[in-house]
Image (cartoon, coloured by chain):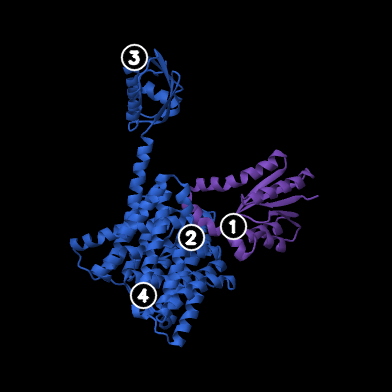
Amino acid sequence: MDNLREQWFGNIRADVLAGLVVALALIPEAIAFSILAGVDPMVGLYASFVIAVTISFVGGRPAMISAATGAMALVIVSLVKDHGLQYLLAATILTGIIQIIFGALKIARLMKFIPNAVMIGFVNSLAILVFIAQTPHFIGGNLMTWLFLLGTIALIYLIPLFIKGIPAPLIAVVILTIVAIYSGFNLNTVGDMGTITQSLPSFFIPDIPFTFETLMIILPYSLALAVVGLVESLLTASILDDMTTSESDKNKEARGQGIANVINGFFGGMAGCAMIGQSVINVKSGARGRLSTFVAGVFLMFLILVLGDYVVQIPMPVLAGVMVVVCITQFDWHSFKYATTAPKKDVFVMLLTIGVVLYTHNLALGVVAGIVVSALFFVNEISRVSVSQQGTTYFVKGQLFFASTESFMNYFKSISMEQPSIQIDFTQCKVWDDSAIGALMKVKDQLKANNITVTFLNIDESSKQLMKKLTGSTLTD
Amino acid sequence: MYQHILLAADGSENSLRAAKEAVKIAKINAETMVTIIFVIDMVKVKTEVLHASSNEGLYMERRQKIVPIEQLFQDEQIKCQVEMIHGSPGPEIIKYANTQNVDLVVIGSRGLNSLQEMVLGSVSHKVMKRVQCPAMIVK
């Protein structure tokens, strides 16, 4: 309990301040992600409020910010377009249930097996897709649209040189919204994209037919959402773990994300997950505890209740400008160096992940494709042993097991030997299983048939023991 | 002579040169203690975690940057310890110097990030202005 008290009230002042900062930075993003998903801004704002507040109690990583995110918004675009909001809410609840199951099955441990190349591809394709989703708000727009867009971007980069503590995107939005209102320029606003209701979210059951057919419609989306949500949440948790030099319970976080999404769906919010950018802002602002996430959610809702009338007047090019900067920050610029220095197969996997996501607009498919291809590369690599010859000694290098015995056998089949006796050296090779030992015996017998005697050298102790167990003798004797 | 020298290190060429100067000074007094401070920049953590194979892989990558510097002190049998701190480099070095009884700070004139220095000014300049003990900036 002491630990929990520490997680809530160990850092009150800094947690509250950071929470306020994050709430301010969160509003433009929650609205932009709602518009991206094709729903009213309230759906993203309610989601951000409900998820942040819920996760502050049930999450595994204190100080992490979860809300409506771009990654989730991208997955649901087509569901909203084809079936509407009610199906999205149902899918959100199902996503939560799947995530709770993942948490119970301790699936978070498996995240370690997602290769870097796939994670880098995930982060980059997310940034690219969110950027592309902004382009309709300014491409083809008039001069004023472009001025407001570029003005927003410029302000966001310049403001931090003079003002620290208040998020620059918010200052830029406030200044340019005021300019837009008083100058009377004809710009698209948030109000044109949907309505802002100044009321608290309320509980209701999504209005859908409870049939097998409905389940089949939402299940693929929910599965994708569950995977995408956990990938981003657990990556964010790892980043915060490192920033705060503390550890967090990833399975509890997975379960917490699930609980948050279930509640969220019943209160009219779209599926969400942890946000890398906002969480980093939170911790950099001094947050360490759960209180920061709670304050961020509550203050965000408070601001909407009070300032809703002004929020609808934010010009769309300004919001798009904020999102362009989010994408620039989100994108992993180090990838360009990575592409030239990393092993070719890793670069291939990264590009493949990006390619699949950009083609299908589904981050989950990109992740799955990336994992499958890197697993294939891995198996291909590990299932090969190389043999080199020096005089009458043959040096084996690699792992000898059922998948690699063939390449071992093939080597000794393919070469012609004149020497009456040879040695095979295993200093750099480990013999793993019955197939490997079978291969050794087979090579020995085959060469014996050609009047060549074989001695095995430097077989390590555990391999010898395995031989003894299986054959009753170590082949080296 | 100096009892506690703080050497700021980021693994750059410059910090290695600074370390060599710190060795010269520390050698004078057998009692001198050298603290090598390596600040893990919060801004870079996202990239580092994304590109690291595991927590341990990331630890190795960071630790590896200080090993050559540590070696210089060990070769001369100078007492030294390593501090790895998360934060932004300038303020963390200053905070450590001003709270841990440091009587000399040694730092390279410019580190790894030249673009950021152009915009925000160099870390060494900030450190020199705000530490309460003498500072030595190594070109």
Residue that mark 2 sits on: A62
Q: Label 3 marks which chain's residue?
A: A
Cα distance between the residues tagged 2 and 3: 66 Å
Residue that mark 4 sits on: A140
Residue A407, compared with residue A157, is above or below; it is above
Q: Label 2 marks which chain's residue?
A: A
Identified at 41% across, 17% down, the residue is A422
Q: Secondary structure at mark 1?
A: loop
Nearest-to-viewer mark from 1 and 3 = 1
Cα distance between the residues tagged 2 and 1: 31 Å
Q: Quadrant of residue A139?
A: bottom left
Q: Secondary structure at mark 4?
A: loop
Residue that mark 3 sits on: A448
Q: Secondary structure at mark 3?
A: helix
**Neighbours of disc 3 within 10 Å: few (<14), some (14-19), many (20+):** some
* Residue type of the residue flagged with mark 1: Asn
Q: Earlier in the sequence, mark 4 or mark 2?
A: 2
Q: Earlier in the sequence, mark 2 or mark 3?
A: 2
Instruction: Report if residue B100 is visible in the image.
Output: yes
Q: Label 4 marks which chain's residue?
A: A
Nearest-to-viewer mark from 2 and 1 = 1
